[in-house]
Amino acid sequence: MNLIRLKPERASRQLAAAVALTALLASGACAGRLPSPAMTSQPAGSFVATAYCRGTITAAGTRVREGVVAADPAVLPLGTVIRVGGLGQRYNRVYHVMDTGRSVRGHRIDVYVNNCAEAIEFGRRPAVVSVINPTSKPSR
């Protein structure tokens, strides 16, 4: 067995780096990836996604911000935490259902984005939605 001898300070830095890397890989957060939806969420099904950019206060009484979606409360009640896939790398993420809309009915979601040109460019896209937390309390 070949042992490499390191100075104590260098050995502790390498050990700390190895521990940090192991923790990162074990958490599943490497490269910004989220844990597998099959392990953490319940499928809600196929949806049609659009984007919106206007408004200041959501139906839940919170300020609009990225990470918020509007949905039909009969399908996804306010406060529900969902994971959305199939929209492209920029938009595949976890969202909070905090808003509703007249045209957001059935299996439709409306993703909030800051930029109205981006919302128009988003268009209409098919999405796969999984429910992570059915009804968490809305945070203001």
Image: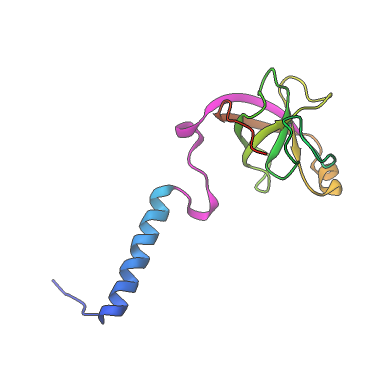
Left/right of residue 44 with respect to residue 107 in the rendered view? left
Q: Which is more toward the observer, 30 or 12?
A: 12
User: Farthest residue in the bottom direction?
Assistant: 7
Residue 40 painted magenta: yes
The correct choice, above or below, for 42 with respect to 87 in the image is above
Q: Position of residue 111 (x, y in %)?
A: 74, 37
Left/right of residue 2 with respect to residue 93 in the rendered view? left
User: Farthest residue in the top direction?
Assistant: 74
Q: Position of residue 104 (x, y in %)?
A: 78, 25
Magenta-tinted stretch: 28-50
Residue found 76% across the figure and 27% down from its top: 100
Residue found 38% across the figure and 54% down from its top: 23
State the count of labels: 0
The C terminus lies in quadrant: top right
Residue found 74% across the figure and 33% down from its top: 61
Question: Which quadrant of the view contains residue 110?
Answer: top right
Residue found 48% across the figure and 33% down from its top: 40
Left/right of residue 127 with respect to residue 120 in the rendered view? left
Q: Position of residue 113 (x, y in %)?
A: 77, 45
